[in-house]
């Protein structure tokens, strides 16, 4: 017991004797948002009724400046109940070959399609559903694709109507 107390006391004395600049150097710097950004998410048709076609989720993504080499863009969406129980995971991967605009950044639009079914292949019930969209940029190398950067999540809700509600 006495030995462990002396060990802790020694550690405290060492820390207190360090110059303030050494302690301040350990602070984490604030990191800004990644250069891969989800600019817009739109859904159609509104309202959507399962069994009456597909829901199109259109996502506009801004790529970082000056991409060198081949890349893949993956855009994914998780649709869930408000209780956070997963309903369906959608994704699309596509090669990135879009020329940049005047600012040096490129924008890519992709569409994810949902048939209104859950993971058990049954139509979901009417109600509000949450979605979470994320974009990932992969660099393609000799060992295959490797994650280069991930966007912040974009969240929203969508309203699912019953087919009977649309016929009224």
Image: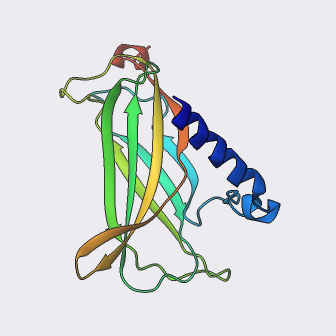
Is residue 81 found left or right of 15 in the rendered image?
A: left
Q: Position of residue 165 (x, y in %)?
A: 42, 15
Give coordinates of residue 25: x percent, y percent.
72, 64
Q: Furthest residue to the front?
A: 2
Rendered-image quadrant of the C terminus: top left
Q: Is residue 53 visible?
A: no
Q: Is residue 63 visible?
A: yes
The percent position of residue 142, horizontal first and vertical second, equals 24, 82
Give the camera-side residue of 91 and 158: 91
Please say which color scheme the image uses: rainbow
Residue drawn at (32%, 56%), measured in percent from left and top?
92
For the point 68% across and 80% down, which residue is it? 103
Left or right: where 52 falls relative to 30: left
- Residue drawn 63% across the image and 48% down it: 11
Q: Quadrant of residue 29?
A: bottom right
Q: Nearer the viewer, residue 62 or 165?
A: 62
Query: Is residue 59 toward the left or the right of residue 122 in the image?
Result: right
Question: Is 128 drawn above or below residue 134 in the view shown?
Answer: above
Q: Nearer the viewer, residue 34 or 90?
A: 34
Query: Does 56 appear above or below 107?
Result: above
> Residue 116 in the image: x percent, y percent?
31, 30
| Picture mark count | 0
Side (left or right) of 91 relative to 48:
left
Residue in the image at 36% along x and 82% along y: 70
Residue situated furthest right in the rendering: 20
């Amino acid at each position: 017991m006495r030995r462990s107390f002396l060990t802790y006391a020694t550690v405290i004395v060492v820390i207190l004797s360090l110059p303030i600049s050494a302690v301040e150097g350990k602070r984490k710097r604030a990191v800004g948002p990644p250069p891969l950004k989800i600019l817009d998410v739109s859904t159609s048709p509104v309202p959507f009724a399962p069994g009456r076609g597909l829901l199109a989720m259109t996502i506009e993504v801004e790529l970082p400046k000056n991409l060198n080499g081949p890349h893949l863009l993956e855009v994914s969406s998780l649709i869930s109940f408000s209780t956070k129980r997963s309903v369906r995971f959608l994704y699309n991967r596509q090669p990135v070959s879009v020329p940049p605009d005047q600012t040096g950044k490129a924008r890519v639009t992709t569409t994810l399609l949902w048939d209104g079914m859950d993971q058990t292949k049954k139509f979901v019930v009417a109600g509000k559903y949450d979605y979470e969209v994320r974009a990932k940029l992969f660099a393609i190398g000799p060992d295959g694709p490797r994650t280069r950067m991930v966007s912040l999540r974009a969240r929203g809700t969508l309203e699912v109507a019953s087919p009977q509600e649309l016929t009224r």
